[in-house]
Image (tube, rainbow, N blue to C red):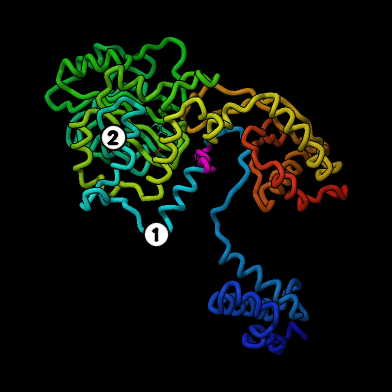
Amino acid sequence: MANTPGGAAALPSVDRVLRLPAIVAMIESHGRVAVTEAVRSTLAALRAAMIRGAASGPREILDRDIVVRVDATLAKVVAPTLRPVFNLTGTVLHTNLGRAPLPESALAAIVDVARGASNLEFDVASGRRGDRDSHIDDLVCRLTGAGAATVVNNNAAAVLLTLNSLANRREVIVSRGELIEIGGAFRMPDIMARAGSRLKEVGTTNRTHPGDYESAIGPRTAALMKVHTSNYVVHGFTAEVTERELSGIAHRHGLPLIVDLGSGSLVDLRRFGLPYEPTVADVLSAGADLVTFSGDKLLGGPQAGIVVGRPDIVARIKRNPMKRALRVDKMTIAALSSVLRLYLDPDRLPERMPTLALLTRSPAELRALAERIAPPVRSRLGNIATVEIEPCRSQIGSGSLPVESLDSTALTIRPTVPRREQGAALNRIVAAFRTLPLPVIGRVQNGAFQLDLRCLVDETRFVAQLAPLNFHTGSDR
Ligand SMILES: *Cc1c(COP(=O)(O)O)cnc(C)c1O
């Protein structure tokens, strides 16, 4: 009997399992070490279950069962945890879902330099040591009108490095209306403290005037700073000081104006029918001495933080030892340089830049897509839910245009069960979409599961992988 101590002896030895044809095949693809480890832990778990004699413990173990269990154990170890998903949340630049999708040219550029050696920090013409920023700084300057540029790991790093370079143990004046917190623990006061800068808050949450900055300037002031309020708007009885006014005040006192622009577009999005977002060039021409922005927000590139501005200040930033700790990898530079090159031909950006392509998808196109994919989704869900095509609003996300949204189309899935079971039924549906081979992430709103189709590009793959949903039997269990 399996639930007597002697039952454990019914298990085969590790060696015998390793000779099973299915296991031999696993060794061929995953190697002996990983498979042996998986066999050992599978047999140990089975032995423990048999000794416990739990009702759930298996009574008789077939080789076939062992193979299935080893396969599952192995999959947990060898399968990558980072993998693609369908972002149907309606937030195009979704930080938790990896922000900007990269253009093909950037992907090719990454592969090209990642495979072998490159001239990352080597000047091929002179044969001397080079500077990794040299692969992007001329392009960035051309596209923004800046005098100099440098690149670090992300915009948070750009802000940290800038403040530490310019205002270590000195004061930086910021409006109380701009002390932002961005998702993922980026809080301006905390970053300032870590940069060694003293935050001097001025004005109030809703109103800050030029005189507030003016009277806060003292002998310990290192810079004035303006922070783009990326993820909220101060609305109503408000006043803020523009970059132009602020740069006037800063320069009269011989101080630099730093602007953390957050998203920072390189082109005026209105030319593509999108709402206005201040461009890096606009802010520089309004008198900012230094602007920091992200590479993977509206710019549509890889994660990076870009600092542009006055050459003497950028040079100081580049000399800071912290720059070495925050620098970017060759893959980032390859992708960023490739994306920046696309901006040299702004007319063709919407076809070549996935972010812009998604943001500018036409309502008619989204509607047609919805008409095509609603039937297969409906048939998979059977009678457990209704699937309707409904208008919805997409957001740009990642701190761009927080209150603006774009007309879009969604599949809205509502469970057809009595009201008190609706929450549980909805959760089961949401979880089922999440456990598909390419997890489908939507948003739950008003008791429904909404799939905003704006970011659905690989329609064929989406439909082809719906089979495991398997609700069409009529059972919702
Ligand atoms: C997004 C954002 C940051 C942080 O940028 P990351 O690239 O995510 O590090 C900082 N400041 C502002 C204003 C932002 O919008």
Taking the image in four quarters, ligand 1 sits in the one at: top left
Residue 103 located within the stretch drawn in magenta: yes
Viewer-proximal residue among 152 and 223: 152
Q: Residues within 10 Å of mark 1 (few under 14, many from 20)?
A: few
Q: Position of 25 compared to 269: left or right?
A: right
Q: In the rendered structure, which segment of residues is drawn in magenta?
A: 94-104
**In the figure, 155 relative to 84: above or below?**
above
**In the figure, 73 relative to 268: above or below?**
below
Residue 370: horizontal and vertical position, in percent? Answer: 74, 32
Dominant SS type (magenta): loop
Displayed quadrant of residue 413? top right
Residue at figure coordinates x 37%, y 11% from the top left:
239
Residue 65 visible, this orientation: yes
Residue 182: horizontal and vertical position, in percent? Answer: 43, 34
Task: Give the labeled residue for mark 2.
Answer: 149
Q: Position of 449 compared to 92: left or right?
A: right
Q: Which SS class for mark 1?
A: loop
Residue 306 located within the stretch drawn in magenta: no
Q: Is mark 2 within 8 Å of ligand 1?
A: no
Q: Is mark 1 within 8 Å of ligand 1?
A: no
Question: Furthest-left residue in view?
Answer: 219
* First of labels 1, 2 by sequence position: 1
Q: Residues within 10 Å of mark 2 (few under 14, many from 20)?
A: many
Residue 98: horizontal and vertical position, in percent? Answer: 51, 43
Residue 353: horizontal and vertical position, in percent? Answer: 52, 34
Q: Position of 104 compared to 165: left or right?
A: right
User: Which is more foreground, mark 1 or mark 2?
Assistant: 1
**Residue type beneath disc 1:** Gly
Residue 48 visible, this orientation: no
Task: Give the labeled residue for mark 1.
Answer: 116
Check the picture and name the quadrant holding the N terminus: bottom right
Q: Which SS class for mark 2?
A: strand
